[in-house]
Image (tube, coloured by chain):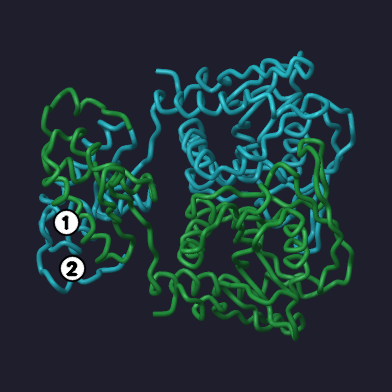
Chain colours: A cyan, B green
């Protein structure tokens, strides 16, 4: 919120500079309600001029399908920028992700897929965060829950766009967490036992949470997280994964996947990947 | 890069809409070089008009200390938005972080500090990422390296702003990493042995890396990471931590801290926190 030399050098902003500055302010702080009076004061301009400018900005955002301005009337009213991602851009991003996933060099012994490079790509994650925000943005969410290690970047990408905190479930606990709640769970695909722990003070009782993870096979880990969250009386409003794979039966009823691995042929070195089930969700239906 | 209905509805963009759209395009893709010809084509405008508009945008960014436009001449030239954070805003963000850190309820048995809430705050992390980008943005960096679990969000925040991939060192290895390189290291403060592992294919030999972590006490973990990176013939161009604490001797020579815990009094329930050493660094000196 710095005033810079414009405030000193010119009593009245030029309209063109004002438009650039308003666009910048709105885009830099998505979801934040900015009172119209603060704009009017900042630019020494009439509220009617500010409204005209906002109409121009809204028209451009709308045309680009990149977001919209929400105006709230009244004393506590103002305007805020709501980012948005359209179906066309979503498909472009996911088509690119599918293509990267089908690289046969990803196949590891046992048919596992190497995905650390994708989960290490901050630009890809940023775009996936925008998609999560579209899918879950209308639900009331208090926190994004994920499990270490690979789910973390995806959870942050979602959290940044949903403006909610991230809470990390851990496989082992450390002294820097304080007291923790632990559940034992069985991995659905390997049948191995795992402990999942969450610091007592990291999640308020009764929170509404979105669970995000990188990969779901049978869904054993997701089911374990849901069990653990029950200890916090949390309500799971959604489960989202970047990649799921086709298995006879999932241990989790409802979840959203961005991509689906339909086939991994270790011998033939072939991977097939499709869009996940996200386009069947409300947010992407008309 | 969608053309929306503007491209259909109007042959020539109105100047005001063009300014809003250009600002949006530049801000949405920091560091990306956009050819002037693509703007000229998009808006059916002369290059001279585009240049005028860019001057207006540059003036506003400069006045706000929020970034600048870099124009490159020549056939492969264009313009790109370089985000920026000024010393004043940096101090506001870190003063707020210091205040949050001094909350006595953070003190855990053994004098450890609970910080998961701070590391779970995507807005704070976003701003810390902008600060890392200012400090390390002029160094040639190929990857940001961190260690699970708490360093991961900070590494992604830096990576998003530096536009570089994240590589995660792990304490235990899983089958989904492929073959790994492991070193044994001794924690400087606890004296305990730890294993640090990194997937062979996650970092190219000879990479220039920035190491980012949440907390540094004696620096044993950071030293271990540096040792591990030697196996990859990597060059460590910087080490950055969100919080360090005052100890007689650090095991790492050079590092940048955003904040410094100067005192934790478990009995008196008192924490003192100051700005770290970042303002002694080149990027924040005149």
Chain-order first, disc 1 or disc 2? 2
Q: Mark 1 highlights which residue?
A: A17
Quadrant location of residue B3? Answer: top left
Number of residue marks: 2
Q: What residue sits 57% from the left and 24% below the top?
A: A98
Q: Is residue A3 above or below residue B8?
A: below
Does residue B282 appear left or right of residue A200 in this picture? left
SS label for mark 1: helix
Quadrant location of residue A285? Answer: top left
Q: Give residue A158's position: percent from left, percent from top.
A: 54, 41
Label 2 neighbourhood size at 10 Å, few (<14), some (14-19), many (20+)? some
Q: Give residue B88's position: percent from left, percent from top.
A: 38, 74
Q: What residue sits 67% from the left and 40% below the top?
A: A116
Q: Between marks 1 and 2, how big is the CA–CA gap? A: 10 Å
Q: Mark 2 highlights which residue?
A: A6
Contact (CB < 8 A) between labels 1 and 2? Answer: yes
Q: Give residue B252's position: percent from left, percent from top.
A: 71, 74
Q: What residue sits 16% from the left and 50% below the top?
A: B51
Q: Give residue B68's position: percent from left, percent from top.
A: 30, 59
SS label for mark 2: helix
Does residue B164 appear left or right of residue B184 in this picture? left
Q: Which chain is home to disc 2?
A: A
Q: Is residue B4 above or below residue B164?
A: above
**Frontmost residue, A223 versus B62:** B62
Q: Is residue B184 above or below residue B199?
A: below
Q: Is residue B280 above or below residue A265?
A: below
């Amino acid at each position: 919120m710095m005033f810079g030399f414009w405030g000193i050098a010119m009593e009245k902003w030029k309209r063109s500079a004002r438009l650039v500055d308003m666009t910048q302010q709105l885009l830099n702080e998505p979801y934040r309600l900015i009172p119209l009076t603060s704009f009017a004061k900042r630019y020494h301009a009439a509220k009617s001029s500010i409204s005209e400018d906002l109409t121009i900005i809204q028209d451009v955002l709308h045309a680009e399908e990149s977001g919209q301005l929400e105006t709230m009337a009244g004393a506590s009213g103002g305007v805020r920028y709501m980012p948005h991602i359209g179906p066309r851009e979503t498909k472009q991003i996911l088509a690119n992700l599918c293509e990267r996933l089908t690289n046969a060099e990803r196949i590891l012994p046992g048919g596992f897929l190497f995905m650390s490079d994708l989960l290490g790509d901050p630009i890809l994650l940023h775009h996936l965060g925008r998609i999560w925000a579209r899918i879950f943005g209308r639900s009331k969410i208090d926190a994004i829950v994920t499990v270490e290690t690979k789910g973390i970047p995806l959870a942050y990408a979602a959290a940044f766009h949903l403006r909610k905190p991230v809470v990390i479930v851990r496989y082992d606990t450390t002294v820097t967490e304080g007291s923790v709640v632990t559940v034992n769970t069985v991995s659905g695909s390997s049948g191995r036992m795992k402990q999942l722990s969450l610091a007592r003070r990291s999640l308020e009782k009764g929170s509404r949470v979105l669970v995000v993870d990188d990969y779901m096979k049978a869904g054993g880990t997701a089911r374990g997280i849901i069990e653990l969250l029950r200890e916090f009386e949390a309500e799971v409003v959604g489960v989202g994964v970047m990649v799921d794979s086709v298995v006879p039966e999932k241990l989790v009823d409802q979840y959203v996947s961005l991509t689906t691995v339909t086939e991994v042929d270790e011998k033939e070195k072939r991977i097939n990947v499709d869009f996940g089930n996200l386009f069947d969700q409300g947010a992407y239906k008309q």
